[in-house]
Image (cartoon, helix red, strand yellow):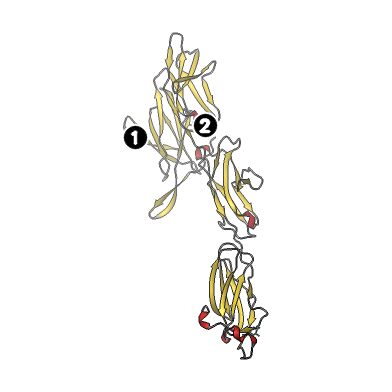
Amino acid sequence: MLLWVTLLVLAPVSGQWATTTRPIISLHPPWTTVFQGERVNLTCGGFHYSPQKTRWKCVYQRREILTDTPGDTLEVRESGQYRCQAGRSALSKPVHLYFSSASLILQAPLSVYEGDLVVLRCRAKARVTSYTIYKNREALTSLEGTSDFFIPDATLKDNGAYHCTGVTEDRLISSNEVKIQVQDLFPSPMLRASPFQPLEGRSMTLTCVTQPPPQRSKVQLQFCFFRDSQALGSGWSSSPELQIRAMLPEDSGSYWCEAGTKTHSVLRKSQSFQIRVQIPVSRPVLTLSSAGAPAFEGTIVTLHCEAERGSSRITYQFYREDVLLGSRVTPSGSGTSFSLSLTTEHSGNYSCTADNGLGPQRSEAVSLSVTEPSLTHPFRSLLVPSSFLPQ
Ligand SMILES: *[C@@H]1O[C@H](CO)[C@@H](O)[C@H](O)[C@H]1NC(C)=O
Ligand SMILES: *[C@@H]1O[C@H](CO)[C@@H](O)[C@H](O)[C@H]1NC(C)=O
């Protein structure tokens, strides 16, 4: 019994996205070439349900014939191209069947995927004592006592044109040629991270997205996730998902995933991308260059604001009371400064904020009181003309 899995095709229907199912034809017996007079059952599958009625489009001898069958099966005895449709489903891909009048045929399956055990069957109407299998016209092997040739674990190297010959009592007969085209068992995976820019301390879920086609839905894939070439978690697992409970700053790095068959006969890597753990800014510290010294009119004071932690670019803003004095953007890991030439209006409580988009933080207030220098003050002579000072 075949286990069908639905292949969803997204198609726009009257401006909206609707899902329609594209059916898949399977053959019983499984060969695309049979002898004339034999019969092949085509089954239209790939639905979650068994269709009550199936419509078949058959093209043979350049004529298209529509046939409706109850159920999902059509019995066929004519060479041609067959497609099916159930209800409002899409049309399946065409399947070509060949009913041969030759005395020797080589039978091959409808489709071959990487990792398949492929059987090629050489069949004769006459009594044949030995068969020889050829690939691209070169003899591969002689078959004694059997007419089946096996290709275990098919790979792209097995692509080619195959035929067979058979020795009868009085002559050598040759079969039709079948082309074997090994298809990818699954596309290269895509790595998804959710959230894409995780916050420090929060969880992140990685998903390795790929899937075998519905024709090979029973193939179990294994997955492995990497950061900077190191396997994460417990390595290979049958789950396409990996959750990292709490992201740490050192979890930043280049991530990718790999998907493969159980035996690793087929392995594919995703592209890698950088994940940077987002670290919120810590409370910044405001320091004044005049700290401890008396602040006189005309003195230049430098305000320095620095948050010890915080990823990406940080915007710093300087305030006196609630008045914004200035704003600076710096890369993470450094503070920034702001200078003022003092006048008595500059007395007040100063503070700064740091913000990297993950929630601003405000420093503690630092109070500054500017005094007018008395004429007798010893520092009076050190005052710089105001035209030399930055505004
Ligand atoms: C095709 O299916 C019908 C109905 O299930 C069955 O009677 C018949 O033997 C099948 N033919 C082949 C070639 O399998
Ligand atoms: C600065 O803050 C302190 C404490 O909140 C307050 O008492 C003082 O009046 C403030 N100074 C100015 C100049 O607003």
Q: Nearer the viewer, residue 21 or 70?
A: 21
- Identify residue for label 1: 65
Q: Quadrant of residue 357?
A: bottom right
- Kindly tell me whether mark 2's CB lies below 8 Å from ligand 1: no
| Residue farthest toward the bottom in the current orientation of the protein | 375
Q: Quadrant of residue 293?
A: bottom right
Report how far apart the C-alphas of labels 1 and 2 lie in the structure. 37 Å
Which of the two discs, 1 and 2, sits closer to the camera? 2
Q: Earlier in the sequence, mark 1 or mark 2?
A: 1
Looking at the rendered structure, the kind of residue marked 2 is: Thr
Q: Is residue 272 left or right of residue 53?
A: right
Within 10 Å of disc 1 (Cα), the crowding (few <14, some 14-19, many 20+) is: few
Q: Is residue 382 visible?
A: yes
140 is higher (above) or lower (below) than 198: above
264 is higher (above) or lower (below) than 310: above
Q: Position of residue 270 (x, y in %)?
A: 54, 45
Classify mark 1: helix, strand or loop. strand
Q: Disc 1 vs disc 2: Cβ atoms closer than 8 Å?
A: no
Classify mark 2: helix, strand or loop. loop
Q: Residue at left 49%, top 16%?
A: 131
Q: Position of residue 124 (x, y in %)?
A: 46, 17
Looking at the rendered structure, the kind of residue marked 1 is: Ile
- Quarter of the picture containing the N terminus is top right
74 is higher (above) or lower (below) than 134: below
- Identify residue for label 2: 155
Within 10 Å of disc 2 (Cα), the crowding (few <14, some 14-19, many 20+) is: many
| Residue farthest toward the left in the current orientation of the protein | 62
Q: Is residue 23 left or right of residue 293?
A: left
